[in-house]
Amino acid sequence: MISTLLQLVLGQFIRLGDGLRPSAIHPTLQMHRVPGVAPHGSGQRSLCTPRLRTVLDRVVAGTGTIVLGLGATACIPGIQDADPSVRDAGTTDAGTTTTENVVPLTELTVALIPDRADKAEDNSLEDFETYLEERLGLPVTMQVTEDYDMAVDLLVTRSVAAAYLGPFTYVQARAKNPKVEPIVAHIEASTGRPWYTSVIVVRADSDLTRVQDLIGQRFGFVSQSSTSGFLVPRVMFQRLGIDPERDFASLQFGTSHDQTLQLLLEQKVDAVAVDKAVFALGLERGLMSLTDYVILWESEPIPNAPLVINDRVSPELKQTLQDALVNAPVGLVGVNSAASAGYTIVQDKDYDVIREIQQSLELN
């Protein structure tokens, strides 16, 4: 049975602790077919600390309401209440390296999961490289891998010292090498919070108005290693007693979020599960409109994808890298090549909710 912790991402009997604002990318997105998603808060600012917590602060007995702790910890540049350079003693992850046997790096290569098909051609990543080179005093290279698994393998085998991974791929990497650790996650420009959501998108002229209507339809996932494009919607289907292999007419995997969305545009599938930011980007670029495509389902907040290091990174370089990103100028592109409102420090336990989902699905 799925524990109550999983309610964090499944969109039922959940409300945000405070302050999640409607999307600045496309404010009407919240108004279309999102059953089970509580209305967003009033946008009040919350007390800011440098530590992102993805644990539940409180379960209100008998009401079915879970209050999400993230709202009280995310930081937006310009309204911080705590100095992000201050670190708590004794809060170091088990995977943290020591100065012993660490060979100083002469360059830093960061592996990137290919969450978008055109990521390798994204010129904005050059600004990210340049900024880090100036702050770290090292050459920095962003390496987009062929698939999600390759990014994990490069990091756990120490072929690279750092990687941008999805929440699920981070959990997989940590299981293979306990010396890898997340150090920061970006803050979404559209929400001002360090989380994102998964959505299921369908054609507006279809007869699909609830998740159960997907039975017998053609469905598109991103990749079995994708958090928002597979893991989160898959556990939602499990809760509803839906087995995609058994109950859907066919399954396709697009390998990246934008290519999965393209499957829907080309009418090769009837519905897709993707990161909501990719759907919003499709609207912004005019590839689709809310007249033709709508959100059938949206998850509750998922911890944002982390920048992860292994034990090739010394404690001193880790500190410098964290400080560089937490204090990065507004507008610097995120490590996921999307608009970022800054960064916040994260640690391994912030992704325990992903482990809970993984265990419930019996995935490796």
Image: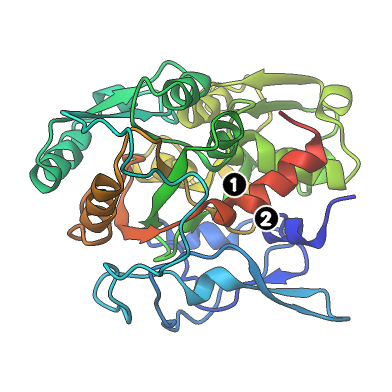
Asked whether residue 292 is in view, the answer is no
Q: Residue at x 84, y 80 (%)?
A: 63
Q: Quadrant of the C terminus?
A: top right
Give the alpha-carbon distance from disc 2 to disc 1, as whole Å.
Answer: 9 Å
Q: Residues within 10 Å of mark 2 (few under 14, many from 20)?
A: many
Image position, residue 114 (x, y; %): 42, 26
Q: Residue at x 42, y 83 (%)?
A: 47
The three-letter code of the residue at mark 2 reads Val
Image position, residue 243 (x, y; %): 86, 31
Q: Which sits in the foreground, 349 or 111?
A: 349
Q: Residues within 10 Å of mark 1 (few under 14, many from 20)?
A: many
Q: Residue at x 81, y 42 (%)?
A: 360
Disc marking residue 198: 1
Q: Which sits in the foreground, 196 or 260?
A: 196
Q: Secondary structure at mark 2?
A: helix
Instruction: Provide the residue designation for mark 2.
Output: 9
Image position, residue 14 (x, y; %): 71, 69
Q: Which sits in the foreground, 146 or 300?
A: 146
**Farthest-out residue, front:** 100
The three-letter code of the residue at mark 1 reads Ser
Disc 2 to disc 1: CB gap under 8 Å: yes
Quadrant of residue 178 in the image? top right
